[in-house]
Amino acid sequence: MTLQTALSGLLGAQTGLNTVSNDLANANTTAFKSQTALFEDVYPANAINTPGIGTATEGISSDLTQGNLIATGNSLDAAIQGNGYFIVSNSGTQQYTRDGAFQLSSNGMLETLNGAAVQGYAGTAGGGLSGTLGPITINTGSMGANSTSNLGVTLSLNSSDTIPATTTFNPADPTSYNDTTSVVTYDSLGNANQVQLYLVKQPTTGGSTPSWEVYAQPQLASGTAVGSPQLLTTLGFTSSGALTSGSPATLGVNWGNGSATSNINVSFGGTTLAAQNFAVAGLTNNGYSAGSYSGTTISKDGSVISTYSNGKTVSAGNLALANFINTEGLTPATGNLYTASSSSGQPVINTPGTGLAGTLAGGELESSNASTSSLLVSLIQYQQAYQANTSVIQTEQQDSQRLVQI
């Protein structure tokens, strides 16, 4: 019986050594969660006033506390601050990980370093999110140009301006207009052409609020004028200076450079008339030139944002996080991965920062929570327990040999 008891202690110490050794081996593994071997005592069934007959492994407990966050300088990396696991598709199997070391595949798919596809809600053409969990794919190629179809120009006009001395408008004659400004417009080829706007105050009668004619002179990117100036619109105002008429207006331009004809909706919404200096209060433009892929970042809320050389940003979608009723019930798998089990329950999936899901820290990774100092202490304790049980077994063997010799 003593031999069996010591053997159970020896096996228990070996389990403890294996657990501590695994923790030490993963002290630098991204998002690793340290484990502790748990033991239970063993007694004979229905025995009274008898010593125990050893120990048995009760289970392996995982320490799921968050590790420290470390900046990596890689914009595709992401660390979870709080609860949750990234969701990945690994050879068609849905698994979970706290390891946010991500990369892009050759076709722009966001994946782990082991090639598992990171799951989330892909962006839609309308700027929303898909309602179905799936891979996140980023356009790492070029972004095509978009011709300007909507142009917003908000002006602050000076009511104290006088009527121009020259009554016939001529862009070459500054005495024929009050103010001028230029706005960029993009054609279908992505050329940054310009439209020069000229503001001309109109005569009034009977103390009415003055109106302002707006002339437009399109120009190629080279500065060459396209056609003659057009009377784009006439802006009317209330006595309090609020815009009442003349917006929006349509500007049609045949650029003559191989691009398609532009039909630009020009809105002067928000333009005011007051005793103020002339100024451009705001500009909006839905056109842009072509651009090449610059990089991708992951935001706090899980948004995967790509940038391009033309200054545009595009959301490829949102990462998703999974939470479980019993996270200790997750089954560890090789590659910093976990699989769900009947003990963990099914995943509850949210975007970062919603529900029970934590937020993300882009450009950072979660370090292992294994403490080498405490593990070294445990290592010594298990070594001593192993040696002690080995001594008991050796003593029992010697006693048995003496008994046989009698």
Image (cartoon, rainbow, N blue to C red):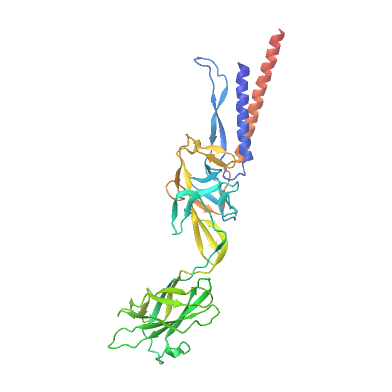
- Lateral position of residue 283 relative to residue 58, left or right: left
Q: Position of residue 138 (x, y in %)?
A: 54, 56
Of 315 and 50, the residue lying toward us: 315
Q: Position of residue 317 (x, y in %)?
A: 48, 54
Extreme-bottom residue of the structure: 165
* Residue 93 falls left or right of residue 381: left
Quick one: which residue is furthest to the right in this view?
405
Q: Measured along the vertical axis of the image, is residue 331 above or below residue 57? A: below
Q: Residue at x 61, y 30 (%)?
A: 15
Is residue 287 shown above or below 36? below
Dividing the image into 4 quarters, which one contains the C terminus?
top right
Q: Is residue 356 above or below residue 108?
A: above
* Residue 83 appears in view: no
Residue found at x 50% / y 37% = 328
Residue 108: image x %, image y %?
57, 55
Is any atom of residue 148 visible in this view?
Answer: yes
Indicate the quadrant containing the N terminus: top left, top right, bottom left or bottom right.
Answer: top right
Q: In which quadrant of the rendered view does residue 251 lie?
A: bottom left
Closer-to-camera residue (121/330): 121
Task: Tell me if 156 is positioned left or right of 302 in this view.
Answer: left
In percent of the image, x 31 and y 87: which residue is there?
204
